[in-house]
């Protein structure tokens, strides 16, 4: 997947974010499938190691099971964040938007392959709102 050159969105648009912020968030969302696979793998390791206890490592105690659980929770939170924003923006086209933001596909793909039931204008307004909302949520996370 290459970086497509797109028309610039006017700064007057209520959902405007900078080009570089957009690409940062886009690449964040494109990791969704990687997070899902990692989470599944960690869950299987967690189940296999459920009976393990804390290990002594030097002068510190290590808790590999707890560390796995924390990592699974972090991955799950990232995935839920994307899913929740999409559902809040528009449940009507949520499944199409989910594919677009996690796979990087265009409206044309959604229209031709998935038969998205809305106009391009309707879709892109919500698509831009998704990125704007995600940007705001990520900014709030950075502050806390």
Image (tube, rainbow, N blue to C red):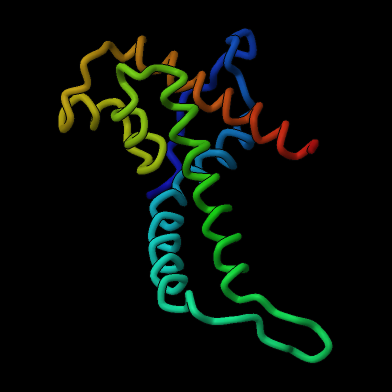
**Position of the C terminus by quadrant:** top right
Is residue 97 left or right of 89 when viewed as pictured?
Answer: left
Q: Quadrant of residue 24?
A: top right
Is 47 placed above or below 23 here?
below
Q: How many marks?
A: 0
Closer to the camera in the image, 43 or 31 = 43
Q: Is residue 23 above or below residue 94?
A: below
Residue at 60%, 76% in the rendered image: 64
* 141 and 99: which is toward the camera: 141
Residue 81: image location, x then y, percent: 52, 36
Q: Relative to 53, is 90 above or below? A: above
- Residue at horizontal 60 percent and vertical 10 percent from the top: 14
x and y percentages locating residue 41 in the rendered image: 40, 68
Query: x%, y% of residue 93?
Result: 31, 20
Quarter of the figure with residue 83: top left
Identify which residue is drawn at 44% across, 13% down. 125
The residue sitting at the bottom extreme is 58
Task: Pick whichever, 57 or 123, lies toward us.
Answer: 57
Judge whether 67 appears above or below 107 on screen. Answer: below
Residue 120: x %, y % from top left:
31, 14
Residue sitting at x 35%, y 43%: 103
Q: Residue furthest right?
A: 59
């Amino acid at each position: 997947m290459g970086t497509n050159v797109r028309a610039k969105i006017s700064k007057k648009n209520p959902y405007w974010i900078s080009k570089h912020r957009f690409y940062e968030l886009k690449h964040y969302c494109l990791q969704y499938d990687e997070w899902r696979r990692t989470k599944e793998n960690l869950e299987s390791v967690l189940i296999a190691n459920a009976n393990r206890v804390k290990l002594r490592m030097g002068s510190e105690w290590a808790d590999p099971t707890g560390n796995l659980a924390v990592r699974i929770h972090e991955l799950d939170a990232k995935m839920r964040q994307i899913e929740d924003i999409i559902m809040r923006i528009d449940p009507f086209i949520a499944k199409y938007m989910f594919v677009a933001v996690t796979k990087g596909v265009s409206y044309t793909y959604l229209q031709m392959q998935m038969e998205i039931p809305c106009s391009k204008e309707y879709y892109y307004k919500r698509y831009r709102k998704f990125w704007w909302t995600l940007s705001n949520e990520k900014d709030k996370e950075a502050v806390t």
